[in-house]
Image (spheres, rainbow, N blue to C red):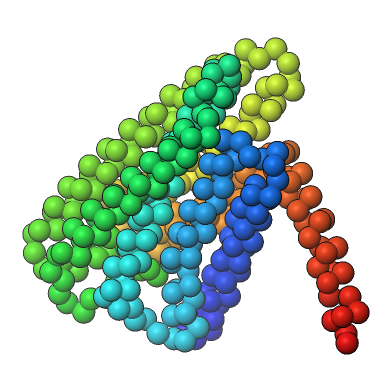
Amino acid sequence: MRELQLLHFWLFLGIYLAAFLGNGLIITAIACDNHLHTPMYFFLLNLSLLDLGSISTTLPKAMDNSLWDTKDISYMGCAAQVFLFLFLLSSEYFLLTVMSYDRYIAICQPLHYGTLLGSRACVHMAAAAWGTGFLYSVLHTANTFSLPLCGDNAVDQFFCEIPQILKLSCSDSYLREVGLLVVSACLAFGCFVFIVVSYVQIFMDVVRIPSEQGRHKAFSTCLPHMAVVFLSISTGMFAYLKPPSISSPSLNLVVSFLYSVVPPAVNPLIYSMRNKELKEALWKLLTGWFPKAMNCLLSPSNHS
């Protein structure tokens, strides 16, 4: 129905603009405020960059299809979408693992924080997250698109996704990619265990902090990260590892929407709600930018 297509377009446009604005403000605030040039905010800046990239990989094409009533994507366009989305999504997951290590050192070993997480170490860890995501994406994309495809080549999803592409395979060689997905799930589970163990140690140390203000500050920096990790991991693993018996086009669409669109849109809100320093930097950025913009618009030179 044309009305539903237009509804999808406006819904996706609103979500995309919210994600772009939220992540863009966080990136600008961290880059411009010297007080936020710390390891935690450096990793948060990288997370916002990854969120912007991942949502820009899927939603613009979906909005284009809904607006112009088309359903087509080229073979190379589909391959590029799979590669970029996997690269950005997996890099984000590895970065969330690094961020849990950052919080563990900051709270459980604060005297070693400057030594273990210097500027060079932070750059190396962020580069390792991006690099591992790149290699992971190259492996899966090359393996998936080396499979012979048949049928009408219809991907039953609003973007190109590996589980949907595997359904179009004509040979049993798709089991090779399934095996890679299982290995990837084991790697993801290992990262998840690392994150859980880190936060168990963190909370054991937090409850021993004598001052209520100290406990509140520790929780305010850890709880948003835990919420983002849970949202990203639970929806992503369910999308790729759910049994075929409960699979349906509607459920697949909802789950893919939850793990590909919702996290990039809500992550800025989650991180800014409980973080006083970030809220102050955002407020300083907005209050400093708005008067300058108004002066620029109302200056006599613009009316000459």
Examine the rendering and report whether any part of residue 68 can be seen: yes
Total labels: the figure holds 0
In this rendered view, identify the residue nearer to me: 303 or 284. 303
In this rendered view, identify the residue nearer to me: 239 or 83. 83
Left or right: 10 with respect to 154? Answer: right
Left or right: 152 with respect to 92? Answer: left
Residue for point 63% across, 29% down? 219
In this rendered view, identify the residue nearer to me: 164 or 146. 146
Residue for point 17% across, 47% down? 179
Above or below 249: residue 124: above
Above or below 238: residue 286: below
Quadrant hosting residue 25: bottom right
Quadrant hosting residue 54: bottom left
Left or right: 279 with respect to 241? Answer: right
Residue for point 52% across, 22% down? 115
Q: Position of residue 253 (x, y in %)?
A: 40, 63
In this rendered view, identify the residue nearer to me: 215 or 131. 131
Q: Residue furthest right?
A: 300
Q: Position of residue 166 (x, y in %)?
A: 21, 62
Residue for point 53% across, 30% down? 118
Above or below 252: residue 101: above
Q: Position of residue 102 (x, y in %)?
A: 52, 30
Q: Position of residue 51 (x, y in %)?
A: 50, 55
Q: Quadrant of the C terminus?
A: bottom right
Examine the rendering and report whether any part of residue 96 can be seen: no
